[in-house]
Amino acid sequence: MINTQRIAEIIIDKSNFNGKIAVILGSGLSRISDKIIKKTTIPYSSIPNYPITNIKGHAGEFVIGELNGTSIIVAKGRMHYYEGYSLDLVTAPIRVLSKLGVKYLIITNSAGSLKIENPPGNFMIADSHMDFTFRENAKDPMIYYDSIFHDHGLIAIAKSASNDLKLNTCTGCYCWTLGPSYETPAEIQDMARLGGGAVGMSTVPEMKTSAELGIKTLTISCLTNYAAGISTMPLTHDEVVSNAGKFDKEFSELLEKVILKI
Ligand code: HPA
């Protein structure tokens, strides 16, 4: 089992982090970390026994410093269940953040939009989630709206930040699928019928762990594509990463504003 206490100590030794806010950045969404000053960068590969991510679009490092005067830690890149890691490893970064004293976590991801009215380039604030993985022992998919997973105060802050910036942001249900292949149009129809708003291959294990640890959590998806069958647009990982890059500037502005308002 990974020693998250030791990892937290390494991070404190190297960076003196004593903040309350953390951000996890999904594929291709890294711009906000460029705005951090008094920066310490800790590659995951430099931390003993730390899992590394091998997915294109994921840098694999912690960036610690100050953003507009606020002390912050950013995890650039995450481990995915589909990479063969256990849920314990996938959620280890959250336990590290908790040991560092983090109280507010913003989880970001790239996701496919299930609604024609929310095109790529829009952002979705998750007000709920659905486990669509059908793992052994997993319950049939249902929507969870609980504030322990989707902090109502943080959702209000994110909506107000988006209004200030006049961004196209919706709220909706984030659906977790196992991946790594994209969904079939029939699966997407099923998710949409159950009330899904966006689909992605991460985030739900992390938000569950952060809820267990009492960290207030906000999930924001960058809608990089229409999910399979919603439109005829191509759906490849390269397309997803390159679209995330295109929308990263506005996405980072939104994150920055949210952090200022917390
Ligand atoms: N499906 C699953 N994961 C994703 C998608 C998608 O359409 N887009 C970005 N991540």
Image: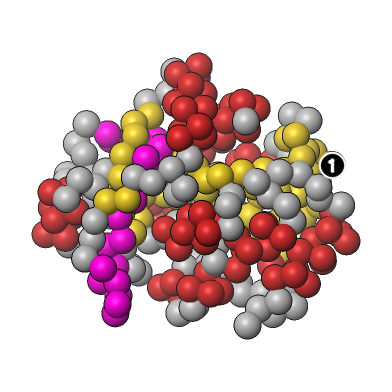
Question: Residue 1: x percent and y percent?
Answer: 63, 83
Does the segment drawn in magenta span residue 137?
A: yes
- In which quadrant of the rendered view does residue 171 lie? top left
Percent x, y for residue 136?
Answer: 29, 79
Colouring style: secondary structure
Q: Which residues are magenta?
A: 118-139
Q: Residue at x 81, y 50 (%)?
A: 17
Count the numbered circles shown.
Answer: 1
Residue 114 inside the magenta-drawn segment = no
Q: Which residue is under mark 1?
A: 38
| Location of residue 196 in the rendering, given as x and y in whole percent from the top left corner | 24, 47
Q: What quarter of the picture does the C terminus occupy?
A: top right
* Residue found at x 47% / y 27%: 156
In the image, 4 versus 44, the foreground residue is 4
Query: Is residue 103 toward the left or the right of residue 80 in the image?
Result: right
Q: Confirm whether residue 239 shows in the render.
A: no
> What residue is at 21 percent from the left and 39 percent from the top?
115
**Residue toward you, 108 or 55:** 108
Q: Determine if the C-beta at disc 1 is less than 8 A from ligand 1.
A: no
> Would residue 143 appear left or right of 110 to someone viewing this image?
left
Circle 1: residue type: Lys
Within the image, what quadrant is residue 49 found in? bottom right
| 178 left or right, relative to 115 | right
Mark 1 burial class by Cα count in 10 Å: few <14, some 14-19, many 20+? few
Element at label 1: strand
Q: Position of residue 34 (x, y in %)?
A: 69, 41
Q: Nearer the viewer, residue 122 or 217?
A: 217
